[in-house]
Image: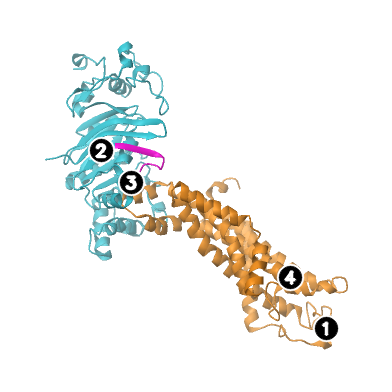
Chain colours: A orange, B cyan
Amino acid sequence: MRRLNPSLIAGGVIVGLIVVMALVSFVWTPYDATLVNPAVRLAKPSWEHWFGTDKFGRDVLSQIMVGSRTTLFVGVVAVGVAAVIGVPLGILAAMSRRWAHELIMRTNDLLLAFPALLLAIMFGAVFGASTLTAMIAIGIASVPSFARVIRSGALQVMRTEYVLAARAAGRQPFPIAVRHVLPNVTSLITVQASVSFAIAVLAEAALSFLGYGTPPPTPSWGRMLQESQEFLFSAPRLAIFPGVAIAIAVLGFNLLGDGLRDRFDPKLEDRR
Amino acid sequence: MSDVLSVRGLTVTVRDKTLVSDVDLTVGPGERVGLIGESGSGKSLTALSVLGLLPEDVVAAGSVQLTGVDHELIGADERRMSRVRGRHLAMVFQEPMTALNPTMRVGDQIAEAMLIHRTVPGRRAARAAAVELLGRVQLPRETMRAYPHQLSGGQRQRIVLALALANDPALLICDEPTTALDVTVQALVLDLIVKGVVARSSALLFITHDLAVVATVCERVLVMYGGRVVESGPVEEVFTRPRHRYTEGLLAASDLETNERRLTTIPGNVPPAGQFPSGCVFRNRCRHATDVCSTAPSWTGTASTGFACHHPAEVTTHA
């Protein structure tokens, strides 16, 4: 068993804590995250409200907790969309003849050049702003990077002797893709998923900040940030808490991705 | 009886370079034929052409016929070839460490080999047959549940052999099957290969650069150099009375019972692909070469025994 590396542990712990926080928020939060209470609006952090309250008197800690559900949900769906389209595309490209390969990858490059947020805003304008449209748009925007990474991994697998042996045994291309190529690029999928997850979390926050993401009253870290704008000087904590939450979540997923990559890549092992 | 494998005028090219030219090769029923030559002599390309597994920009021309297959193998589409590969024709590769899928259990991989061609009625029968095949290569049934990384190189190569023999192919091609193995397990694997093909009366095309291995495994041998067959004949004939100067050099280089302390070598190196001299491909390294060698030597002898050399070694010198 190989030793766990520090970034894998740190990333795992951070992501684990966010997941636990999201799960706990289903059964318990200090207050109802959407409960408006004008009596305590803009309260400073205290024993009653650890992170204080916002302009409507809603408890910030409760909102952060419930907001983590949105964050994780967005990440899972966006990464899911990206993987479900990107992985088969990458494998297809790797297994195709030269001209088909070029066609897929050049189209992919075209998509890669298209800004993800612009695509999401377009989606929001056409289909209406909601968490789901934001997620799908972010997912589609993440397809090219998935396809690119999986293609390179699949190309390596296609050059191995066991694929040659499978072909020599009379295996058809589709079973080779499913039984030989896919299982041998799963580590790449895992790494790419955690990196895309971080990007999706950031993108959702940005979209919500711009008003194209999660609509009110569902708590979202990005929208909390947006709502804090007018109090940036009088009550900066309203921006700091969700901002730090976003930063930690992105850091956690990036560390996890880095850690997984180091763990799966035998070439890096000796250098440590 | 007609030949199991019949290769006629096989030429392999990549862009403007010719890697294999005009190779004729036959393997009779149950016959064990060796194909020897240095790296870059075109032996592996010949095997891959037979299987139709050449890389995308490498093109084979000529004719390859296999018993039990009613179509020409050169230029056959993937769909038809995939029905031939693994069924009528199987291959053992050089590198046992990478020839098995690291994410699949060994038993599943062997069972799959039979399920692809539906030579067994179902999954259960395939697994039973896989256990039996493992027994034939002297591996315990517990090996079924092992992953490739849990096994040694010799064990893996025996599994690759079991996989190749799973469907009783008419022809087994082995490409340097023991080169990557320890000397101690080489003999075992060679023994299992010979036993395996004899038990199934399969023919064997054995590719190697190890003359000692050819001498123990094969009945007939073809010597390749520069993408051409330069000499062929029964093993004891070629190895005791070589006619082509290249074969002669090859045998001298592997003769360990020489009185001199220095190892005998063939002068020079194998030229890079596509840069062999015109005429006789060996003439730039041959001590006997003269002006006449700039024209291609014709084949002397019969189809199965003969050589292509302008200045063949005298039969008496090595007798």
* For residue B191, above or below residue A244: above
Range drawn in magenta? B53-61
Which residue type carries mark 3?
Answer: Gln
Query: Residue B15's image quarter?
Result: top left
The x, y position of residue B210, in whole percent, is 31, 31
Residue identified by numbered label 3: B157
Question: Residue at image x 23%, y 51%?
Answer: B136
Q: Can residue B104 be spotted in the picture?
A: no
Which residue type carries mark 1?
Answer: Arg
Label 1 to label 2, Cα distance in Å? 87 Å
Do marks 4 and 3 share a subunit? no
Query: Residue B315's image quarter?
Result: top left
Residue identified by numbered label 2: B63
Residue identified by numbered label 4: A209
Which residue type carries mark 4?
Answer: Phe
Label 2 to label 3, Cα distance in Å? 31 Å
